[in-house]
Amino acid sequence: MIIKITNFINRVFSKLFGGRKKVRLGFYGPVNAGKTSLANRIAKDWTGEEMGTVSKVPHETREIQIKEHVKIKRDGKELEFNLVDTPGIATKIDFEDFLKFGLKEKEAKKRAKEATKGIIDAIKWLDDVDCVLVVMDGTENPYSQVNITVLGNLDARKIPVLIVANKMDLKRAKLKKIKAAFPQYKVAGVSALKGKGMDDFYQELFELVR
């Protein structure tokens, strides 16, 4: 049983960031790139609390998760963010993929349906975010269908974007490869798990929304 995801990404509409003090910041990208890990790192840095569960099982995040009133300070300035962590985007979901992680067939099919709904909800939420972090796994080929499709649609609709190359603590991570793949975008390299590169990331984030 394969659930195909098509024709949803094209439903987002154009929205420019308007310079407001409270910023709705969306986390988007492929499955297991580290969106929730990054959201947790930001939330913990500035509120002392994490906001989501991280797992090696695909589509652990299947519902939109929101952390409000996250105040980030940089160079004497402060911005308040609402963090909007979304399920990983995928072009198809096969329940059999979950069986490899020890899930029973019934639970695997249930998770596949929930993940499908989560992807649709994630795309709908683009109506309500001011800017987006596109989180990519720095160890993977950046020229994926998901990355290209997400970035293309965000660009077409003028939603401000910062690419975050995650997992930079791993030797096989290639920041230069992601920068070369998408030279028109700013790219921040981080390890959300280790906290590496976060100072530069926050600088780029402030540049994105100013």
Image: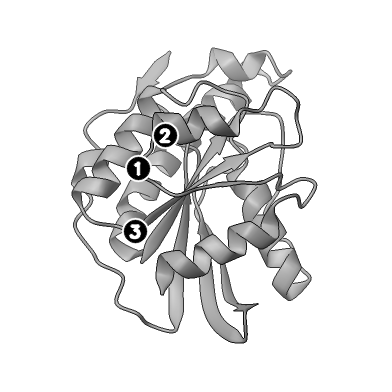
Q: Which residue is mark 3?
A: 160
Camera-side residue: 185 or 63? 185
Residue at image location 42% in from the left, 70% down from the top: 209
Crowdedness of circle 2 by 10 Å Cα count: few (<14), some, many (20+)?
many
* Closer to viewer: mark 1 or mark 3: 3
Location of residue 165 with respect to 47 vertically, above or below: above
Pinpoint residue 193: horizontal percent, then vertical percent.
76, 45
Q: Which mark is residue 62?
A: none
CA–CA distance in space, label 1 to label 2: 7 Å
Residue at image location 69% in from the left, 52% down from the top: 197
* Closer to viewer: mark 3 or mark 2: 3
Name the amino acid, label 1.
Ile
> Is the residue under label 2 in contact with that under label 1 (CB below 8 Å)?
yes
Mark found first going from the N terminus, 3 or 2: 2
CA–CA distance in space, label 1 to label 3: 21 Å
Residue 200 in sight in this render: yes
Quadrant where the image shows the C terminus: bottom left
Q: Quadrant of residue 45?
A: bottom right
Q: Which residue is mark 1?
A: 120
Pinpoint residue 190: horizontal percent, then vertical percent.
66, 46
Q: Which mark is residue 116?
A: 2
